[in-house]
Image (cartoon, rainbow, N blue to C red):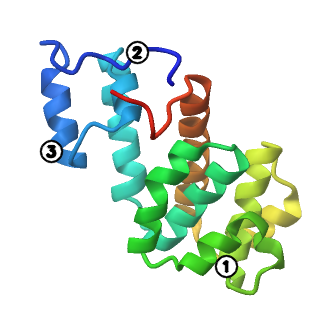
Amino acid sequence: MARLPYADLSRPDTKPLVDRIVAERGSVLHLYQMLLHSPDIAQGWLAHLTGIRQKSSLSGDLRELVIMRVAILNNAPYEADQHAPIALKEGVTQAQLDALPDWESSDLFDARTRAVLAYTDAMTCHVQVPDDVFEEVRGHFDDKPLVEVTATIATYNMVSRFLEALQVHSHDER
């Protein structure tokens, strides 16, 4: 159970944002139900995540592999629960999802994806990225997509840390 109660979605000060979230996302997920305790933060978060997920030039499968790897490394089950179906829709195979915890010993990932996963691991586990890891990922991307993959990794680390600090989980009752 979450450490805080979920926000009241019927409050007049949150109604316009709740309507926008429903229009953009289909429903108000637990993440946003928690964020709506602070409508200004929720609004900024929504805009930021919309940019990361919908306005980036990264392919959907690569983006979702990054998100799933961050969820695994941070032991963030809500994040993984939310993104596994999206990953499959974006072309990630179930075999790749199953291999992701031990991706280094798998032959299911091409060189570019392996470079991104190593970069994800370094950013998530150590914050500072060794030069060899950066140079490997740099060899696969121009500046714009490199900034986008970096921002995606950083963003989903933020998401998992928020979720886990407040113990937001898929099985929670509203």
The amino acid on which the numbered mark 1 sits, given as a three-letter code, is Arg
**Residue 142 % position (x, y):** 58, 71
Q: Which residue is mark 1?
A: 112
Spatial CA distance of label 1 from label 3 is 35 Å
Element at label 3:
helix
Residue at 68 percent across and 82 percent down: it is 109
Spatial CA distance of label 1 from label 2 is 42 Å
The disc at residue 5 is 2
The amino acid on which the numbered mark 3 sits, given as a three-letter code, is Ala
Q: Nearer the viewer, residue 155 or 14?
A: 14
Quarter where residue 121 is shown: bottom right
Asked if the residues shown at circle 1 and circle 3 are in contact, with their CB atoms under 8 angstroms apart, the answer is no
Mark 1 or 3 closer to N-term?
Answer: 3
Residue at 34 percent across and 47 percent down: it is 50
Task: Please say if 149 is above or below 59.
Answer: above
Asked if the residues shown at circle 3 and circle 2 are in contact, with their CB atoms under 8 angstroms apart, the answer is no
**Residue 70 % position (x, y):** 64, 51
| Whether residue 59 can be seen here | no
- 121 left or right of 80 in image: right
Quarter where residue 62 is shown: bottom right
Q: Residues within 10 Å of mark 1 (few under 14, many from 20)?
A: some
The amino acid on which the numbered mark 2 sits, given as a three-letter code, is Pro
Q: Which residue is mark 3?
A: 23
**Residue 53 % position (x, y):** 40, 55
- 106 left or right of 49 in image: right
Q: Nearer the viewer, residue 80 or 91?
A: 80
- 58 left or right of 65 in image: left
Element at label 1:
helix
Residue at 81 percent across and 73 percent down: it is 104
Spatial CA distance of label 3 from label 2 is 24 Å
**Residue 9 % position (x, y):** 21, 21
